[in-house]
Image (cartoon, coloured by chain):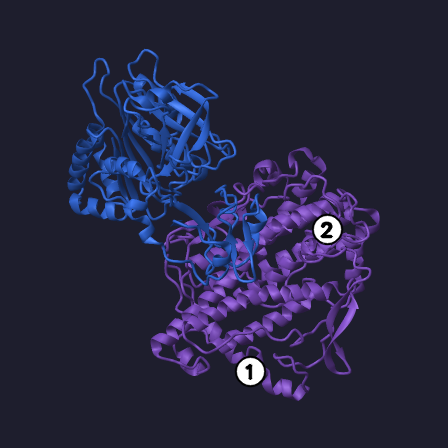
Amino acid sequence: MSLLRQHLIDPEICIRCNTCEETCPIDAVTHNEDNYVVDADKCNYCMDCIAPCPTGAIDNWRLVNEPFTTEQQFEWDELPEENTEALSDSDTPDDDDEVRELLAQAHAGVRARAPDSAGKPLLNMFTRSAPARARVVGNYRITAEDTESDIRHIVLDFGATAFPVLEGQSVGILPPGQTGTGKPHKMRLYSVASPRDGERPNHNNLSLTVKRVNGGVASNFICDLNKGDEVEVVGPFGDSFLMPEHPDANIIMICTGTGSAPFRAMTERRRRKQPDANGRLVLFFGARTPNELPYFGPLSKLPDSLIHKELVFSRLPDADKEYVQHRMKARGNLLGELLGNSHTHIYICGLKGMEQGVEESLHMIAEKHGLDWPVLRDDMVRLGRYHVETY
Amino acid sequence: MTALKQEVNYDDLIPNNVNLSEDRRLRKALEAWHPGFIDWWKDMGPDGFQDTPVYLRTAVGVDPKGWAEFGYVNMPEYRWGILLAPAEEGRTIPFGKHKGEPVWQEVPGEYRAMLRRLVVIQGDTEPASVEQQRHLGKTAPSLYDLRNLFQVNVEEGRHLWAMVYLLHKYFGKDGREEAENLLKRTSGDKDKPRMLGAFNEETPDWLSFFMFTFFTDRDGKMQLESLAQSGFDPLSRTCRFMLTEEAHHMFVGESGISRIIQRTCEAMNEAGITDPTDVEAVRKLGVMDLPMIQRKMNFHLAVTLDLFGNEVSTNAASAYEAGIKGRYQETRIDDDHQLHNDTYAVLKVVDGELKMVEETALNAINARLRDDYVKDAEGGVKRWNKLIKKAGFDYELSLPHIAFNRQIGEFSGLFVSPDGAVIDQSIFEANRGTWLPTASDLAYLDSLMRPVTEPGQYAGWIAPPKVGIDNKPGDFEYVRLAG
């Protein structure tokens, strides 16, 4: 059975100002004497109505088997409860299990929750049975040609289709074709590397950071894409690894390789929208060499007033191997001070192997500053201030 | 002033979609006006909060994605933009004797005075409400409400800019003088008051503020809607964009009163009070009793209805005929949009009694707009009553009769009860305290007006909102107060 994410208006909050009806480009919003409602047969999720709504009533969604008719909605005094039965395993959207499994792996060990001040993510708008189609408008290698790692910056344009994402969310790419046993290829999830208003502000596009993996169907498919090619995209996914929008929020970002993608998005969001925010951005970013560190050039140019950068290399000639966890210890005073601040959020993204070392460093730094790390960590997890996404 | 001019980059300062960078004459005019506006804002805008960062919405474009940019702003640095709704290609004048002709991009000479007058009246109300509300910041029931007050204020400021843009761009020297005068009149001033009565009333407390935004800003919505129909396209496009912001003001009013009612009902239930008219008991709880809310409604509706002018008006008829100001949602009305053969039933005073009288539809334009207004306002009242009923109380709020306590138009000088009975002055006076706010109501309200400045905390007489602004969490610091 297929589920629909239905767009609804909360009648208790709506003040019938007609703004949404006026704004909707395809007349999907209508009203009677009591309520303004969205016609599920017409709404195409373009989201034009969301920002102009003065009340927030417009931003409501329910997973349903059968959409509520406009007549039903006209009668409501309040929104119906979320129908949890509709969410039972047997009824989930066709590719939800696949996504859930991938996300569960990525978030293993941490019961994730979004930060309080994060934006509200939209989820599963496009599914395997009804994917969005995007056109490739850019495919750039961002590691030096003479290095082993081929990491690409891919820009996808969604044309007239709205595909709203928040920084930290992922999208799924469906490689075309089938496996030897006749099943469709598995989807792969990629963190979005651009902020919500697009790789270019106010263009309906987003970017991904993709590393070519030897023998990987999806990554080779993506890394070989040409400008103008079409790809099938599903999602967006992920409702916890999201950036806090409170301007006082400190964001500690710890990553290796393509794990930098969500941090590129978060940093760019801060740069565009809150350049004067009080909260600090601190980045620990590990790679083998500068030539293999994705976005090395542009990243180096970001001013220290926006982001404190610690670029860490493990294969520099004439230097000892250094990993992010080492550098974190070396910056123990900075991190210790931030750990004691209730506005601090930690994000870890990259290879699974890094997680343990990073955690040990945090533990050590916390103790040194008189903080009980296991308690602090649990607190941070509970409050959506500690996030891990590894693969 | 020269120094200031050099410092200000007007392209950055004034988000606009009117090609400001290429219109030298207009730039020059606005550059001359801008310092005076900033002085006015500092003198007459929110008192005590000029250097406070407030989480505000700024419109930087007119497309759905560009016009709600949120961030902390110190109000004098708010980017008051000049934004017109996108032009509709091939738009024709939708009503009046020019119906079907292409809309005007310049002011037609014959309608110049009439248009200027309408723009000036509209423009005069915008700074007036900022002036009326300037002391409210000191008694805000929460940071959330404080932020909403300031959002309303800066948007009224932007609406002033919108009208000043029209005056500067299309009305030459006269326009510039009128734009100057918009900063010279002051709400409630004995010598130079604002042009309309309701905009010289005080807004001393937050119940008054919510009532004002619910009732009086709703008149603004109706006026803007009818001007959005105008054949003078720049006026139409300006007003269309203003309407999207005006919606926020309606929201502040309607939800503010909802939250007051909700809190009152909760408190009465907690205390086991079953009779909402047991005012003494209710006031002991530190919440606003429903009968007082009813009296405030009575007052604010009457004052606002006066803004619609004479019910039967040849001025309004002329503006309609000329294609300058239409009816509410003109294009959705199914008639010939010229009204030469139509009539409209208007409530009038005939031999001391209230009677419906058929008037020519043209002369009844104001009466019709007022009727549409009352219908629009009733929607909110219905919502409030649902809250009261849901909480288990047998009490209904209602709009008073349109002839109640009126000072302008058909019913001025007449004594009418809230339920519409024509009565003697003596009976009216004997009931004044039941129907209109009393000195003790105002003193009680005043006693409740104590600021709450902790993020996420609310004064005891108002419930927290159901959702935050811009989806923010409950304890979000909407206003960063110093210290």
Residue at left offset 35%, top offset 12% = A145
Q: Nearer the viewer, residue B374 or B29?
A: B374
Vertical order, B27 against B425 (above or below):
above
Vertical order, B217 against B29 (above or below):
below
Q: Which chain is blue?
A: A
Going from N to C along the chain, the mark reached first, 1 or 2, is 2
- Amino acid beneath label 2: Ser
Subunit bearing disc 1:
B
Of the 4 image quadrants, the one containing the N terminus of chain B is: top right
Q: Badge 2: how crowded within 10 Å, few (<14), some, or many (20+)?
A: many
SS at circle 2: loop
Determine which of the numbered discs, if any, sits on residue A390 in the image: none
- Amino acid beneath label 1: Thr
Vertical order, B343 against A123 (above or below):
below
Residue depth check, mark 1 versus mark 2: number of the one nearer the observer: 2
- Mark 2 — residue? B230
Residue B369 % position (x, y): 69, 63
Q: Nearer the viewer, residue A267 or B93?
A: B93
Q: Badge 1: how crowded within 10 Å, few (<14), some, or many (20+)?
A: some
Subunit bearing disc 2:
B
- Same subunit, labels 1 and 2: the answer reads yes
SS at circle 1: helix
Residue B274 % position (x, y): 40, 81
Q: Quadrant of residue B16?
A: top right
Of the 4 image quadrants, the one containing the C terminus of chain B is: bottom left
- Mark 1 — residue? B434
Residue B177 % position (x, y): 74, 50
Q: Which chain is purple?
A: B
Residue A154 % position (x, y): 41, 24
